[in-house]
Image (tube, grey):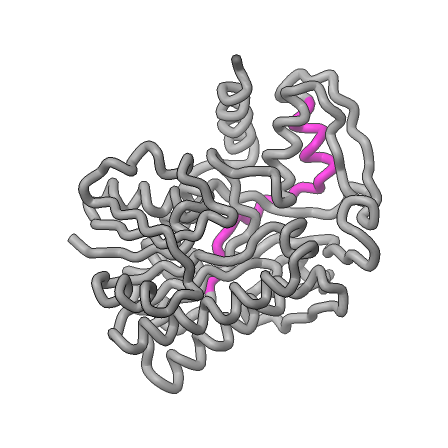
Amino acid sequence: MKKILITGGAGFIGSHLAEELLARGEEVYVLDDLSTGSLENILDFKDNPRFHFVLGSILERGELEELVRLTDEIYHLAAAVGVKLVYENPVYTINVNIKGTENVLNAALKFAKKVFVASTSEVYGKDVRPDRLKFRETDDLSLGTSLRWCYACSKALDEYLAIAYYKKMGLPVVIGRFFNTVGPRQTGAYGMVLPRLVRQALLGQPMTVYGDGQQVRSFSWVKDVVRAAIELMSCPQAIGEIVNIGSEEGISILELARRIKDKTASSSEIIFIPYHQAYGPDFEDIIYRVPDISRLRALINFVPSLNLDQILDRIIAYERQKIRP
């Protein structure tokens, strides 16, 4: 049995990671300040004797170091997340993501602990890959000047910092770039498109599509994502690597809204909201963001367990149950 620390473990992905690690027989410590996470996410397993919740922040070095000392491995998921939150709170985003990651890496180095660093597809920036329309880990990163990209910039710096700790000081790190992870417990409050559209459809509210809806994304089932992270941490060849974690099945947001509308038999109207109205002036978005997961397949033989239609069916069923009186 390993002792595992998850920063941000009361968040959407973090809580699923904690649940899976507990199911595998591990002892799990969660550090979370509940700024975007929720105690509701961990209710199902909070009484497990192998689960320990600590209310605190990765910015508090003393408490963080004590937890790192006690545990064998670290999954660093704590971050400012969500397009809306990031765009509205850029100083908070940069501070938490960069200083927090530096604190985690310093503590891991001090006690010689392996670290999984959760990164994001946002680091690829706004370039389209017209030759293949998929992002590879070897692609250059191209960010814009809008504050919308401060999250991507901070996470890219996290990656560089982690790789520097690995190459210069020998700290074992694995970096996973998550692409649009979805599933139960995800909130639409911070700009997560899929749960927002599903809830709007089920409630008969207008389904809001930003821009013209032609932007293409891929969506990954959360249990596949946490399985990939765990298996990468057990893969010696993944140390020092940056790995895309996601699905190669792309869909435009407009088509996604239409598919949800059909699956829910909703009477909701699909309406288009200009980006500046949704987020503010100078907001930029990317047209196409789908990963190439060749490296993930090569390292751990990864195959998604669900396709997009199956994911939608499960999320619709979950949200329908939540909104029933």
Q: Nearer the viewer, residue 303 or 10?
A: 10
Residue 25, position as x, y percentages in the image: 19, 45
State the image quarter where residue 232 is shown.
bottom left
Left/right of residue 287 with respect to residue 242 in the rendered view: right
Residue 323 seen anywhere in this rendered image of the structure = yes
Residue at the left extreme, as displayed: 1
Residue 145, position as x, y percentages in the image: 76, 69
State the image quarter where residue 127 is shown.
bottom right
Q: Image height check: is 240 above or below 41?
A: below
Q: Nearer the viewer, residue 305 or 175?
A: 175
Magenta includes 255? Answer: yes
Residue at the image point whose x is 83% and y is 50% from the top: 276
Magenta includes 218? Answer: no
Q: Nearer the viewer, residue 242 or 87?
A: 87
Residue at the image point whose x is 66% and y is 32% from the top: 197
Residue 129 seen anywhere in this rendered image of the structure = no
Tally the marks: 0
Q: Nearer the viewer, residue 173 or 280?
A: 280
Residue at the image point whose x is 31% and y is 43% from the top: 20
Residue 316, position as x, y percentages in the image: 55, 25
Residue at the image point whose x is 62% and y is 45% from the top: 190
Magenta stretch: give its range: 243-261
Residue at the top extreme, as displayed: 325
